Amino acid sequence: MSNKKETKSEVSLEDIVSLCKRRGFVYQGSDIYGGVAGLYDFGPYGVELLNNIKQSWWRASVHRKEDYVGIDSAMFKHPKVWDASGHTSGFSDPLAECKNCNTRIRVDKELEAVGQAADEKMSEDELNKLFDENRSKIGCPKCGKKEFGTVRAFNLLVKSNLGDFAGEGADPVYLPGEACQGIYLNFKNIVDSTRMKVPFGVAQIGKAFRNEISPRNFLFRTRELEQADTQYFVPPNQNKDAYDRIKQERWQWYVDDLGIAEEKLRWSQHENLVFYCKEAWDIEYEYPSLGFDEVEGFHDRTDYDLKQHKEFSGTDTTYTDPRTNEKYIPWVLETSMGMGRIFMAVVSDAYTVEQLENGDTRTVLKLKPELAPVRYAIFPLLKNKPELVEKARAVYAKLSEQFVCEYDDNGNIGKRYRRQDEIGTPECIVIDFDTLEDDTVTVRNRDTTEQVRTQIADLV
Ligand code: ATP
């Protein structure tokens, strides 16, 4: 409508965090105990939005594809899995501790912030040297002092004590550092029990745990996270075309399925690759206050994973092509997206503040209707008129068989609209006295605020 001016560009990360808490999307983990850094709980609307994003991803990554299947593997795994994957020896970030207040900093990120790229391949000595040269520019985020101890590698795996492996001197059992290992472990099972033939892909959404040195920026860097991964198995050296196609398909999912503004997305290529990786790219989103940063990684992992598990487990993971009898260890093309990061991108992208003509502002989450936590809100015009309430409840009962609906009779209609705008409900349905006469309702659109009269029978 012409009486509104959008002021979206001024959105900050704080606005997003505040809306998420105020409207029941995301709460700080263990809030009533003062909160725990890097842990968050999804609230009633948050879990609906999160599930809708997951469903959209699953549809695009599994159901719409002939050559993909999904799995859901156990989080705990045999301790040797993390030796094979390289996590027990190499899954670390460089850490330094403030000598004054013991606050830990992640040295590579602090160096990056002062314009010094720390290469993942650098030895501890090299990192210490680079850190020493830049000490004068790096202050403790808590006390501001510039006195840190030496830089050391800090392993990010989180330990636990699972039954069978809990004895004295036993290897520690780790929580998953990444979700994708379950897919590699089941490659042989899937080949043996289904009709999948290489090339094919496996998708999974799973939890991962990382002892992040400095969790920060809301859901962007947490210690418990969820990853939506696909691993596409291809014959050796037949990686390039599939890799480029998968990258393009994933980009289109952000734009077409989630409705994210394309100018807020960009590709970023990794310059420093781990030794087994042939190529790596990220999709980045331009987050409020943070700027462009990684949402999803694309890794061309060669045959590293299946070879490692073959060696460490003693089980042959070689694939035999039933059409040609050719034997080989497949190469793997990985996509890995953080659910918290995509959730934050979706909310940030939908967050809109409109200046109304009367001087008021209206906050609206302009989510795609398929993603909105509530699809229809149903209001009786007045809550003290039993005929209206009964009719509104009947409409609620009918629509809630197919959609997530919310019944609200609290406050005046204008306030009810505002509440629904903030959680992104695409349409509000008002039951009034005319409804009792002719079975029509008012349907109010979230984005245009226009209201139209519709027959109840035509609602679905
Ligand atoms: P970063 O460099 O930001 O630490 P990464 O390159 O280690 O991330 P991957 O190991 O490739 O990330 O994980 C795949 C995806 O998982 C990332 O693209 C990101 O969306 C998500 N992710 C990784 N670590 C975290 C975290 N601590 N909190 C939230 N999401 C995360």
Image (cartoon, rainbow, N blue to C red):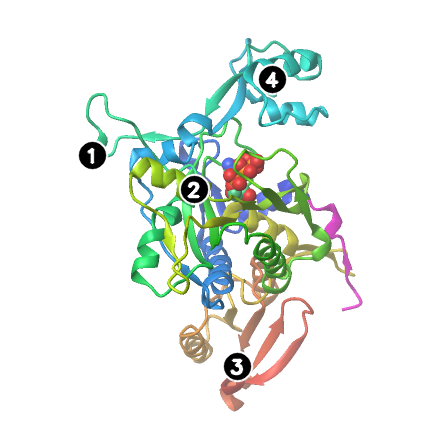
Q: Quadrant of residue 254?
A: bottom right
User: CA–CA distance between discs 4 and 3?
Assistant: 63 Å
Give the camera-side residue of 208 and 180.
180
How far is disc 1 from disc 3 in space, using C-alphas? 54 Å
Give the image location of residue 403, x and y in percent: 46, 71
Q: Quadrant of the N terminus?
A: bottom right
> Considering only order in the chain, which callout, 1 or 4, is on the residue closer to the N terminus?
4
Q: Which residue is mark 4?
A: 127
Q: Residue at x 64, y 44 (%)?
A: 15
Q: Are the residues at dot 1 and dot 3 in contact (C-beta closer than 8 Å)?
A: no
What distance separates the C-alpha of mark 4 from that of mark 1?
A: 39 Å
Q: Position of residue 342 (x, y in %)?
A: 56, 50
The stretch of residues the image draws in magenta is: 1-11
Crowding near pointer 1: few (<14 within 10 Å), some, many (20+)?
few
Looking at the image, the residue that sits furthest to the bottom is 438
Residue at the spot of label 1: 163
Q: Amino acid at mark 1?
A: Gly
Count residues near mark 3 (Cα–Cα under 10 Å), then give few for <14, some for 14-19, many for 20+.
few
Mark toward the viewer: 1 or 3: 1
Amino acid tagged 4: Leu
- Which of the marked residues, 1 or 2, is nearer the chain's N terminus? 1
Proximity of marks 2 and 4: CB atoms separated by less than 8 Å: no
Query: What residue is disc 3 on?
Result: 459
The residue wearing badge 2 is 305
Q: Is residue 424 in sight in this rendering? A: yes
Q: Between residues 298 and 260, which one lies in front from this camera angle? A: 298
Magenta residue check for 386: no
Mark 1 or mark 2: which is in front? 2
